Amino acid sequence: MEKFRLGRTGMMVTRLGFGGIPIQRDTEEEAISVVRRCLDLGINYIDTANGYTTSEERIGKAVKGRRDQVFIATKSSGRTREDVEKHLALSLQRLQTDYIDLYQFHGVNNTKHLDAILAPGELLSVVEQAKKAGKVRHIGITSHQMDMAKKAVATDLFETIMFPINFITSEPADDLLPLARSHDVGFIAMKPLAGGMLDNATIAFKWLFQFPDMLPIPGIEKVHEIEEIVEILEGPRAMTGAEEAEMARLRKELGHRFCHRCDYCQPCTMEIPISTVLTSASFAKRMPPERFFGDMVGKAMEAAANCADCGECETRCPYELPIRQLLNEQVDWFQKLRREYEARTAAQ
């Protein structure tokens, strides 16, 4: 499989990586089979995180005996030295490895979090010490917020940036990607299918594969999913006229309903995590139901149900989304989905 240099990490990664969130939904046997199929197809980059419940452990079992064939990237969303130290130790144990190729600070979406990472003797220093000890080889950062991503790249302290990009959320291609290139920071593309909103993988990945130095990491749950994307990668990448027209149609259709998770709508007077609510469908497709209906999304939906209908969020949204309408729709959808889930589990 075609490879490229991932910024100044120097890692020669395949044009396609593996995102390890959805294998939480599989049985352990299924998850291991999916990861091993990726390796058999030639994929050499696997992404996971401390917070992805069983993902790290399953990946560790899947790559056992083949560790030298793969770059493993994981993450910590810890906000204290102690948390990052604990997460790193746990990741090494779960992944059954003595080193992690790329260790990333996870979900850095505000100045407070970035400042905590960069403060002298704090979070970044923990990972830098681990790097000196050989437990970590490269250090990266992930974000959903453009200003934070740019600021992180400009520090020259991180070797990679992971950020959402797809043909709906295409702005980073014109802004963040050139900045990353100028700092020799590797660009990792999350949300290639817009968190599950795009079901036309051919168009989505043909658009992404036009960038030769970008690493898409689609979340994969089933073997056939990764096989389909590899087929797209290895086939003709130029879009047909019909595909261009369909892409334009989807942009128009979804552009007025798609939350980009920029969080410019915040703060909410009712403390509603707006972007979490508006993107909850993507969590439903990737997370185990007990986690989805629990603290992760359940509490966000409870807050959304108490929306004061003030409309302040809509005045701040750069995409002019009808946020109040979308919140109501998501709450209704979530409640219906939860009732169906509870009925199924009660019948078992």
Image (cartoon, helix red, strand yellow):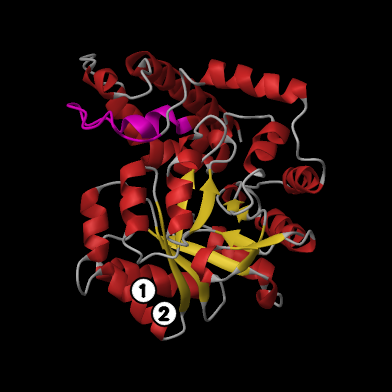
The percent coordinates of residue 312 (x first, y second) are 21, 19
As helix, strand or loop, the secondary structure at mark 1 comes to: helix
* Quadrant of residue 213 within the rendered picture: bottom right
Q: Residue at x 36, y 42 (%)?
A: 146
Q: Is residue 189 left or right of residue 235?
A: left
For the residues labelled 2 and 1, say whether their Cβ atoms are less than 8 Å apart. yes
Q: Is residue 233 above or below residue 261?
A: below
Along the viewing direction, whichever of 75 and 140 lies nearer the viewer: 140
Of 41 and 247, nearer the camera is 247
Q: Is residue 309 in view from this perspective?
A: yes
Q: From the top left corner, tell me how far across and down residue 217 is, in percent.
A: 59, 50
Q: CA distance from mark 2 to mark 1?
A: 6 Å
Q: Can you tell which mark lies on residue 131? A: 2
Q: Position of residue 316 (x, y in %)?
A: 26, 24
Assess disc 1: are there few (<14), some (14-19) or many (≥20) residues with their C-alpha within 10 Å of its C-alpha: many
Residue at 65 percent of width and 47 percent of height: 220
Question: Is 268 within the magenta?
Answer: yes
Range of magenta residues: 261-280
Write the residue at 26% across / 47% down: 110
Query: Is residue 161 in view from this perspective?
Result: no
Q: Is residue 147 above or below residue 301?
A: below
Examine the rendered structure and indicate whether residue 15 appears above or below residue 166: below
